[in-house]
Amino acid sequence: MNQDLSKNTETTQTDNEKVNFYNSLTSEVGSTGKIEVARDRASEPVIRSWCDAMSESNPLYINQDFANDSKYGGIIAPPAMLQVWTMSGLHLGSQFQRDTKDSPSAGVYQLLDEAGFTGVVATNATYHYDEVIKPGDLISASQKLLDISEEKTTAIGIGHFVTTETIYSDDSGKKVGSMEFRVLKFRPGTGKKNEQNTQKPPRPKPASNSSTDWFWDACNNKELRIQSCTECANLQHPPAVRCLSCGSISLDSVAATGKGTLHSWTIAHYPQVPAFEYPLIVGLVELEEGVRLVSNITDVEAEALEIGMPLELHWLNVDDEFTLHQFKPIQNENQSKEFENNETDDSSGQTFDSDQNNSETETVNTEASKLNPDNIQIGDELPVSPVPITTLLIVSTALATRDYQDVHHDPKAAQSKGMPDIFMNILTSAGIVSRWVNDWAGHEIDWDSIELRLGAPNYPGDTMTLSGSISDKTEQGNQTSLEISFFGKNDRGVHVSGNAKIRLAKSIKED
């Protein structure tokens, strides 16, 4: 009895320590730090370096003649550079530390570091763009500490999510944009992927009987079949002993195309069966033939799911005797082929050539500015874009975004903080997505906002494939507002997903 009481007391003390630590973390939530003024004004060389690293070729950013003739009257900075101007810069010999008296988040980071939460990775960012930034503007930032989560267990480690909001202004005090930023501070080596692997039990097989054996036998042959009535031609699923329309027992089956749309879905978190991966997405799929069936939805993050999303069939070989139907988002084959046919760069497979960013030799692609908003419809898909992830890309874009965190250029430092290799920073993810949208929408684009959610990191050797579609369209005077839902996927999963909001007009020039 005394031994049990001792254990309970010890547990209580541990819980109390966690509570006290969390209370110390959250004591500054809601506070605003000191206004930080950029060390340098926005400049064309910094803009050009960013464009070179991102392979961004929009002439508004790099071509003086084109920009002078635009409604802006000169070069503007890419909106995705909003955060770049007030980055701390390089501090050789030591990691830069903000004064905890001037920055509430800096104080939180220090407490977390001292408690062993030394790993850091950005997870979410939402940027709102109010005004364009031009060379000569001096940008300042005011940060507010919004939220600190309780201790969470994630795939890369146990830690706390820290959320901040930063307001950016120019030297006249006018707001130019804002950013809501979320990072995970975690203990290296404590993630789910670091736990000892145990062999999973076999996946349970669906119940089968004399009325459904034929369906599962067809699945084992990688054929999806739908029960049909030979009397009234009614199609039905799940299989039954008689037609649910006319009552006939004369039943057969027809082969399904394997194409359909997502009618609804649910996400299973608990209770967890060891044979499955969680969260588990279970969808109700409406097949082209008009019937619906329940199936797992794979190859997509939950945040990217949408009612009506086009799906296609694929198969999971559970074992030598059982094959299960699953569905994944379908890509527009025509757009994919068009994209492939339009590739004009070198044999590396990269879609964009940074050499084209030299304005002295560049011929501006005016065709890119002729996208007609009237021809754009909700559901239209953007061209699929594969982006090879190289060490050069990760390092050069980190430098161009003035992010000198060692995890983006030093493999040993990244490994010491729980990552297998250097990885792409979130500012680069925002830049690449913005470039992709710019290349599709053309030079007449005005940016409202971009929201990003990070998942699987991008490491050297990966290929991230961007895809997306128009999720909303509204008319506002002579402008068309579009919302683009997107995600970029590598072999381990979805690296980035989110929404981009832009505006298109008939002409970028002043009347």
Image (cartoon, rainbow, N blue to C red):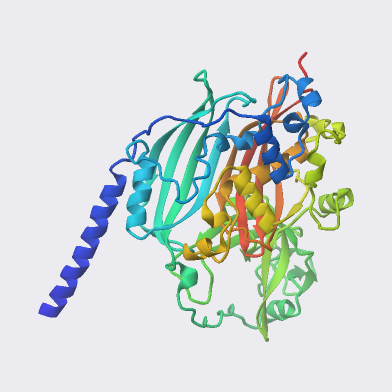
Quarter assignment of residue 479: top right
Vertical relation: 19 (above or below) 36: below
Furthest residue to the bottom? 320
The reply to whether residue 136 is visible in this rendering is yes
Query: Where the C terminus falls, by quadrant?
Result: top right
Q: What residue is at 52 percent from the left and 77 percent from the top? A: 275
Vertical relation: 503 (above or below) 150: above
Furthest residue to the top? 511
Depth check, front residue: 219 or 20: 20
Vertical relation: 88 (above or below) 278: above
Q: What residue is at 81 percent from the left and 44 percent from the top? A: 355
Quarter assignment of residue 81: top right
Rendered location of residue 255, percent (x, y): 79, 69
Depth check, front residue: 207 or 266: 266
Vertical relation: 500 (above or below) 325: above
Query: Where the N terminus falls, by quadrant?
Result: bottom left
Q: What residue is at 77 percent from the left and 40 percent from the top? A: 439
Rendered location of residue 215, percent (x, y): 70, 76
Quarter assignment of residue 221: bottom right
In the displayed structure, does residue 402 sit left or right of residue 292? left
Depth check, front residue: 387 or 467: 387
Furthest residue to the front? 93
Rendered location of residue 309, percent (x, y): 68, 52
